[in-house]
Amino acid sequence: MVMRIVTGLVLALGLAGAALAADFTGRARVLPDQTTVQDTDRGLTLTVGLTQGVPYRVFTLDDPARLIADFREVDWTGLDAARLTRSQGIKDARFGQYRPGWTRMILDLEGPLALGASDLRIDTDTGQAKLQLSLTRTTAADFAARSVAPADPDWGMPAAAQVDPARSRHGGDGKLTVVIDPGHGGVDPGAQRGKWDEKNLMLTFGLELRDALVRTGQVNVVLTREVDDFVPLETRVTIAHEARADLFISLHADALEGGGASGATIYTLAEEASDKASQKLAERHNRADLLAGVDLTGQDDVVAHVLMDLARTDTKPRADRIAAELLDALKANGNPMHSRPLRGAGFSVLKAPDIPSVLLEVGFLSSDRDRANLTNPDWRAKTAGAITAAILDWAIADAAEGQLIRQ
């Protein structure tokens, strides 16, 4: 057996093995029985078995300590996270689609473990490959200094869109532009109950809602994702700005321990959450980027707060009105509603100051009744119809108000 070895210094690794890309064909699959973690005196050694070699990159991020490994299209089917968390140095593992053409593995580390060299070994007889990574215990300060995402423009977050506080609203004389945001995606599954993932259910519902809106002939619809990809929170807002959206609706179906909560809830942006439950929910949603391995360093708002406040003076009441329209339409449709269906919290995807934005928790995966509804195509179709009616009613009133303001 002949092994071909590609070695790269992981500290400043770009796309290691790119020179061999011409040799890599088709979609690689993980080999679970050849994927192992071995604890050592100095740290641990991670081996990822693959059906073939693929371009990859590896780096670490801090706060919390994470190892990120990106691969050119790897199918993770069959790999159990528990196989990796047996190590004393790894407390959690996730893997899945990150963006078109790339998949990601994220390991939450128990402490600071510095990356050494990486070896991608390809068996020239079988074509199978093994990526071996060595991690060594180090100080927190050293780990933090080493842990920076590669400065590759192809992987960077898009520049924050400029806010136009004087931007005119939809005038009622053309099609409304609505951005539908199916929550989570790719390596971030969202809530999970049994075989159901929030990311898949919301993508299905988002596509169905898009079709319902388009059928009216009055709405242009843009989705923040149309496949099972991870989309950073800031990118979702940027997509809405680039589409010059008149309305942004983010779709979710959360799960709470104990399963007591049920029914739909509509959130608008608020600096202070309506209650502790809303605050915790927003914190979980806002951690999605971090859990998916996005480097959030320097991602603070870059737009002057005065412009944002000025824009929100106009958009906050409009967001409150679409929330009220959604509540009325869903109740009239017979949808189960949460005991407090209108709430406010600091969700990141609602922070576009010049676009009315709401987050709709269509139901709770932790509720047996809601889960049965969410997985029922007929129920989803009726719910999409109710949301469509609410959006059209809101658009008429919003355009009329805008005309009065301009007079």
Image (tube, rainbow, N blue to C red):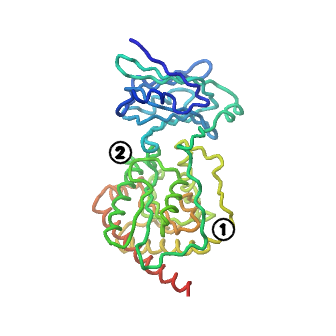
Q: Which amino acid, mark 1?
A: Leu
**How dense is the environment of label 1, judged by Cα within 10 Å: few (below 14), some, or many (20 and up)?**
some
Q: Residue furthest left?
A: 378
In this rendering, the answer to whether 237 lies above or below 115 is below
Front one among 95 and 366: 95
- Residue 53: x, y in percent? 42, 26
- Residue 121: x, y in percent? 46, 20
Q: Which mark is residue 53?
A: none
Front one among 157 and 75: 157
- Labels 2 and 1: the sequence-earlier one: 2
Residue located beneath label 1 in the image: 307
- Residue 198: x, y in percent? 41, 51
Element class at badge 2: loop
Q: CA separation, marks 2 and 1?
A: 45 Å
Q: Which amino acid, mark 2?
A: Lys
Q: Residue at x 51, y 29 (%)?
A: 16
Closer mark to the observer between disc 2 and disc 1: 1
Q: Is residue 4 left or right of residue 135?
A: left
Front one among 260 and 126: 126
- Residue 187: x, y in percent? 46, 43
Q: Which mark is residue 195?
A: 2
Task: State the image quarter where residue 385 is shown.
Answer: bottom left
Task: State the image quarter where residue 326 is shown.
Answer: bottom left
Front one among 128 and 358: 128
Q: Residue at x 45, y 28 (%)?
A: 83
Q: Residue furthest bottom?
A: 407
Element class at badge 1: helix
